[in-house]
Structure formats: C-alpha cells, structure tokens
Amino acid sequence: MKHNSWYPPRAADQVTCLENFRNKLPGYGETVGLTPAQISAGVADCRWMIYVIQSWLPAARAWALACTDAADDAQTGDGATLMELPVFTAPTLPTGVVAVNTGALNRFFALVQIIKDNSGYTEAIGTDLGIVGGEQGAPDLTTLKPEFKLSLTTNGVRIAWGWGGYAAFLDMIELQVDRNDSKGWVFLATDTTPGYTDTTPLPSTLTKWKYRGIFHLDDQQVGLWSNEMSITVGG
C-alpha cells in the first residue's frame, strides 16, 4: 500500500511528529543500519526544529505584533509617555538543545529515506516512528483556494463554503466583503465551521455585495484568494 505526505502541515502536529521521532530513533537506529553519529545528528536536528517551531517562532510573532502596536503609539499615542520600543528576547534554549546548521528539515527527510531504504526497515517501525502517512496527500498550499456559493436568507447573506476535502490540513477561512461603499475589501470574519451568514443589515437600495475568502494555517494565510462572488441585496 502506497503512503505519502506523512509530515503534517500544522506546526503543533509537526512538533508532535518530531518529538516522537527523536525519542524513538535511538531504539531503532541499529536495526535500520544507522551509525551512532547519524542517530545523534538526527536527534539534534529534531530537537532544534522543535525549539524553533514551538518556542522561538511564536515568540517572534508576538514581538512582531508588539512592534506594530509600538509603531501606532509612536505616531498617534497620547503624547504623555516617553516611549520605549519593544526588544525581542528569544526563549531560553531547553537543556540539551543546541543550534544546528540550516536545512534541518531537509536532513530529517533524507534520514527518513535512509531508514526506509534499509533492509531492516519494516512497516511497524515506520508506524512507530511516525513516518508512514495516510492515503490522502496533503494539498499544495501555494495554489489551494476556497470555493463557495452565496444565497440570500431571512438572516442575511449565506456564504456556503467548505474545506474542499482538506479539513485535516487547514485551520480556518478568512472572509472579506466589498459592500460597494467605496471602502473596497474589508475584513468580515474568520470561520472554522463551513457555512457562514453575514448578518449585516441590508441597504435600503439595491446594491451588489462581493465576497472572497482565503484559507489559514497556523494563523497565516495559505494558498490563493477564492474567486470573487457577488450577490444583489437590499431594495
């Protein structure tokens, strides 16, 4: 049976995958023909990636948000406080974690392939190491885009969107609307359950509203904006 795309797209699941692999690799290393140096390097790569994904990246993102707020304060604050700019302090490295050369994920995948190519490798070992995936391949997150339909209900405009079969690889959808009011595209909502109703009061005259959406993974937009959909409301 062919398996593919075993490495998860979500950061939290990646951490789980890497943690499982680095904990169990020493127990299988000799069986699949790895040298002590290969095992140590593989464990070090995993531990470094876990730190970067789980600790450093969230801290960096939080700092970036603080910088945005600081820029706003610098320009439009109340003028009564001497400003101090936020300084980024990286999370302390856990005991035993050291920086490694760039390309740790590439080396991780290469090591997995070495394991799978060894005569001592079995499906049971692959399953225990977490390097055997399901039959469904991950989508191309650079080209994935939502599809939805619009309808007018008694509660407002219904946006019938779906995951396109990739719910396991995505977190939410971001929806925007252009109400033909010279404001252009504005944020409408983020939604994690397919199907959303825009309950904004309808205008008194016939107006065309446009909608679009884009998927999110780990609080970041992924893929492409959907095709723009429009519906006539009001009157």
Image (cartoon, rainbow, N blue to C red):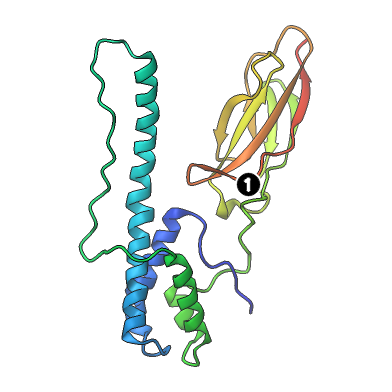
Quarter of the rendering containing residue 64: top left
Q: Residue at x 43, y 75 (%)?
A: 129
Q: Residue at x 68, y 43 (%)?
A: 146
* On screen, residue 235 above or below 89: above
- Residue 6 percent coordinates (x, y): 54, 68
- Residue 136 percent coordinates (x, y): 63, 64
Residue extending furthest toward the top? 204
Instruction: Please tell me which residue lies in front, 56 or 80.
Output: 80
- Left or right, residue 76 beside residue 178: left
The residue tagged 1 is 223
Residue extending furthest toward the bottom? 119
* On screen, residue 95 above or below 68: below
Instruction: Please tell me which residue lies in front, 229 or 84.
Output: 84
- Residue 162 percent coordinates (x, y): 66, 44
Q: Is residue 214 visible?
A: yes
Three-letter residue code for mark 1: Gly
* Residue at disc 1, secondary structure: loop
* On screen, residue 197 above or below 91: above
- Residue 225 percent coordinates (x, y): 67, 39
Quarter of the rendering containing residue 44: bottom left
Q: Residue at x 30, y 62 (%)?
A: 99
Quarter of the rendering containing residue 209: top right
* On screen, residue 33 above or below 84: below
Q: Is residue 123 visible?
A: no
Rendered-image quadrant of the C terminus: top right
Q: Residue at x 75, y 24 (%)?
A: 152
Rendered-image quadrant of the N terminus: bottom right
Neighbourhood count class around disc 1 (C-alpha, 10 Å): few under 14, some 14–19, many 20 upward: some
